[in-house]
Image (tube, rainbow, N blue to C red):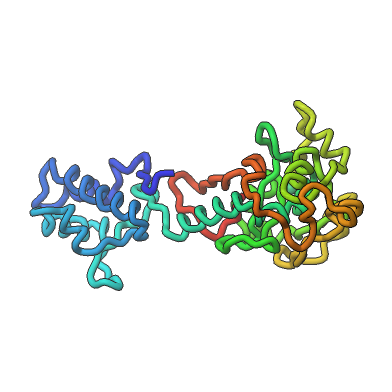
């Protein structure tokens, strides 16, 4: 994703067009100011300075025309003079109709999401605990094939914070993305289901768990059916959080009240008493073989956009 975007109507942005009325402007001035401001924005976006530029950068890009360009840009509120930790600086106008920059918080959060959703030592315990069920609506999720509303994703319960086993859950695309659009609103209207006492494992999930030290066999016909070619029985509408499913008890609390540990009953009893395969079943998660899990279980964070060119909320939910 580009660090900097311009609105479709940016070329005729009113504050930019207003430069024409300046007594010292001629028909070249708008293009000069536009080029100056856009170069500044690219510089800010590339270095994630959140619209702020130091004087040195401004002078470097403005060259011999810096004084006049600053006069016009400040006069027409395309730039504002500010103080920074390093002295004087200028702040670009924040308006997605003209220029939108990704904030440092957004960039860092997306990087964190990417890392978390590729972190096998984090994902396997979550998968073991939740199985192939959405922790919000309870439907069986699938990890392979075409993305649909019931595809599985990883949801950070605490957006903006690095994921932990306690703060990440399995979620269907429908719930995860709806929550990502407005986390606060979603969380105020929905209750996270408790981790299933008998997690449902589809064949792909059972294989992943097995490959990563938790010998597991598929345990749910519903998931198996969902994995059948062409199957897509995802609900048209996400169910209310107050609904219950056949494998979860009524939700007792809010999203933050998550189970604190991976249920040991997630592993078949025979496996626990007679470890097979790696023999690394137990508190030692045996996840040193991080390459044993493939990307089917680590979908990259979904890129969500608000209004066109709008600034993304770093507090949004994620994958
Ligand atoms: Zn769901």
Viewer-closest of 44 and 73: 44
75 lies left or right of 229: left
| Residue 58 rendering spot, x and y as whole percentages | 20, 58
| Residue 155 rendering spot, x and y as whole percentages | 66, 53
| Image position of 141 with respect to 122: above or below | above
| Residue 119 rendering spot, x and y as whole percentages | 61, 53
Viewer-closest of 156 and 7: 156
| Residue at the outermost top position | 230
| Image position of 37 with respect to 28: above or below | below
| Image position of 54 with respect to 60: above or below | below
Viewer-closest of 93 and 196: 196
180 lies left or right of 40: right
Q: Residue at x 69, y 61 (%)?
A: 165
Q: Quadrant of residue 145?
A: top right
Q: How many marks?
A: 0
Q: Residue at x 71, y 63 (%)?
A: 255
22 lies left or right of 120: left
Q: Where does the N terminus fall, quadrant-wise?
A: top left
Residue 261, visible in the rendered structure:
yes
Q: Residue at x 78, y 50 (%)?
A: 214
| Residue 232 rendering spot, x and y as whole percentages | 76, 32
Residue 239, visible in the rendered structure:
no
Q: Residue at x 83, y 54 (%)?
A: 266
């Amino acid at each position: 994703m580009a660090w900097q975007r311009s609105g479709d109507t940016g070329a005729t942005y009113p504050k930019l067009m207003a430069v024409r009325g300046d007594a010292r402007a001629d028909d070249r001035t708008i293009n000069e100011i536009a080029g100056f401001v856009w170069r500044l924005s690219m510089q800010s976006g590339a270095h994630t300075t959140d619209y702020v530029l130091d004087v040195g950068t401004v002078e470097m890009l403005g060259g011999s025309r810096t004084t006049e360009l600053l006069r016009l840009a400040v006069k027409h509120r395309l730039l504002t003079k500010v103080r920074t930790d390093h002295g004087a600086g200028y702040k670009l106008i924040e308006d997605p109709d003209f220029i939108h920059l990704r904030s440092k918080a957004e960039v860092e959060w997306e990087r964190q999401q990417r890392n978390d959703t590729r972190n096998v030592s984090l994902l396997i315990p979550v998968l073991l605990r939740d199985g192939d069920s959405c922790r919000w609506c309870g439907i069986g999720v699938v990890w392979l094939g075409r993305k649909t509303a019931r595809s599985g994703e990883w949801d950070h319960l605490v957006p903006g914070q690095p994921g932990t086993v306690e703060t990440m859950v399995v979620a269907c695309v429908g719930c995860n993305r709806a929550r990502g659009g407005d986390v606060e609103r979603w969380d105020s209207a929905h209750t996270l289901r408790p981790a299933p006492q008998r997690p449902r494992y589809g064949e792909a999930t059972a294989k992943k768990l097995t490959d990563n030290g938790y010998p597991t066999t598929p345990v749910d016909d519903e998931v198996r059916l969902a994995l059948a070619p062409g199957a897509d029985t995802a609900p048209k509408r996400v169910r209310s959080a107050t609904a219950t499913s056949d494998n979860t008890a009524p939700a007792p609390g809010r999203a933050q009240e998550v189970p604190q540990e991976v249920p040991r009953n997630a592993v078949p009893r025979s496996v626990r008493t007679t470890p097979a395969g790696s023999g690394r079943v137990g508190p030692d998660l045996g996840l040193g073989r991080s390459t044993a899990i493939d990307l089917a279980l680590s979908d990259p964070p979904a890129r969500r956009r608000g209004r066109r060119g709008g600034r993304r909320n770093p507090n949004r939910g994620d994958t």
